Image (spheres, coloured by chain):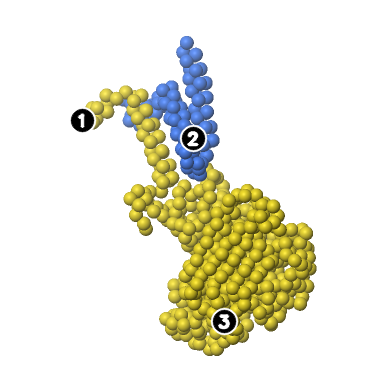
Chain colours: A yellow, B blue
Amino acid sequence: MFKSFYQKWSFLFKLRLFFGVLLLILILIFLYLKIVPFGHISYVRSYPEFIKSGKGFIYGFSPAERIDLKSGDYPKLIGDPVYFSVFTPRTFDTAKLTIKYRSHLSSHEPIIEAGVLADNIVWSYDLKPLQNKIIDSLKTNWSRLENGSKVFLQRDGKYSSWAELEGDLNKGRLQNCPEGINSCLATYNYKVPSHYQQPNLNNSMPLVIETPLRGAHQLYIYLNNQPFHLEFNFINLRQDKADDPILINVYAVNENNKLISSKYLADDQKKTASLNSDSEIKKIIIDEKNLSNGLYKVEIKVRDDTVIKKISSSVDKLVFINKIWPVSADMPLSLWTDSDYLQAKVYSPASRQTINFAGKDFILDEPYKQFDLIVDNPQSAKEIKLNKDDVILENNGVFSFSKSSLFNPDPHKIDRFFKIDDNIKYIIADYEAPLDYVENGFKTKTISFNTKTAYRENSKYNFMISIPGLNSSASSSDYLEIKEIRLDFSGRTLWQKLFKKNI
Amino acid sequence: MVKIKDKNLLALKGLLGARIFWRELFYFFSSLMFVFIILEIIWPNTVLAYFNINYLLLVCLINAVILLIAFDCQKNSVK
């Protein structure tokens, strides 16, 4: 019956029907690729690229001076860090990043990490390890326990099971560690439950820091029989037109980082005069009564256009975590740190200077360049003397404005400056070594990210590949070749979205 | 007696030689181009991520040239 009906159609009608159906199929295909109704999709970019039919989803690496695209078939990363972005037609909850790479790195660059941009205010990336040669080499020499992706390395084999280890960690102790776990434990990509107690503590005195600090900072505060009272004065430099909101979060570290307080101040976009003007100062006060003694972490999330003009604290045990950026301060300025190294970056040409770190002079003669200042000083507190301000100081330890305030509640962290000494008896990490790929020295590693909370702008997620220590200077011949980047995204299905079901 | 294979070849040759086919093909490419541009305006990068619309424009232009030159010459030669 259909055949007789079909035979009555004219040739023109059949041709138009054919093209019409083909057009509809193509539209449905592109709509399917846009909506991703089943919630899973993968994007791949392989090198070398011969023919590209479209723009693709994974955009090229930047900045250009850290990439070598011309010599060789594969792009070479010659500087740190390197960024790339991924366009997605919709939002997803998780992303699995798989990178196939070949390393031509020396012992100065033992760590390779990758991450997704998690916070656009403080511009922080959620970094996960791709490769850590320090842990890889220790795995062959030290006794180890594994639990999924978590690995525990021990010099003397004191622990025979993960449960036994976890029991001790939850109590804030380790065997054969009489001075506390911070003295004998090193961590990598792992947060040990904190039971930090400050030893030999006198009653705290109030502390006022009048040295202006620029941009985001994090603090540890140790409360000892004092009320929790913090006052922050902020001023906005208005060097760009972007909004500059202020967010301060307070966490109780000894209670699994429980959020105690959160204060938010939106940007009212008023013009401000100068750093010394009092007319446009914004104030945030955090007053929490009945908090128990112990360790608290304060996150000050602001953009670099905002300056913390003054900090008033009810306690003097206050340290800055990993980074401090003094600006417009009375010079000379003296700071203290517990770390053996300092990464210093001069932010403006006027701030070039000779800096004294642990009694040793270092010349910072180039702006915007990161200098690594390393000392071999057994003292726990090392002084930093600055003649000029506007220098960003970073390390894996803490900073304070006085020696008496200095304390570090965290165990040693494994980074490229990490040195094994006799005190370190245990290492705990959330890390799996990359797999060797079949071809020519390439390795492959897959890491997962939570993209639900990741920052997404113009339909793009921003990623970073970090190789600490790799610099693109002419004297360095180290690089990392990238063969393939693959991203597997997962998210809600169309039905879950329509009926508003959560995964 | 014409074999079946030759019959299909003749039909295909006839089809490709038919002005009507090239005209409908031109309408198809133009409609496709229009749809792709609308999709790109509403949802940027929906098409361009996979396919460069410039190639479709090129094919559309070649089709138009064939339609204008080949069949116009044919029409003139018939006259």
* Residue bearing the label numbered 2: B37
- Pointer 3: what residue? A198
**Observer-nearest of A436 and A327:** A327
Q: Is residue B51 above or below residue A140?
A: above
Q: Give x and y (percent) for residue A264.
A: 53, 59
Amino acid type, label 2: Ile
Q: Can you give x and y, in whole percent of width and height, for residue A196 in the image? A: 53, 79
Label 3 lies in what chain? A
Q: Assign a secondary structure to mark 3.
A: loop
Residue type, label 3: Gln
Tell me the tag on residue B54.
Answer: none
User: A72 or A90: which is nearer to us?
Assistant: A90
Look at label 1 and name its amino acid: Met
Q: Residue at x 65, y 60 (%)?
A: A307
Q: How many marks?
A: 3
> How many angstroms separate mark 3 from mark 2 (CA)?
65 Å
Q: Which residue is mark 1?
A: A1
The residue depicted at 46 percent of the width and 57 percent of the height is A452
How packed mark 3 is, by other alpha carbons closer than 10 Å (few <14, some 14-19, many 20 or more), is some
Residue A2, located in which quarter of the rendered image? top left
Q: Is residue A123 above or below residue A495?
A: below
| Labels 3 and 2 share a subunit | no
Q: In the picture, residue A207 is in which quadrant?
A: bottom right
Quarter of image, res A482: bottom right
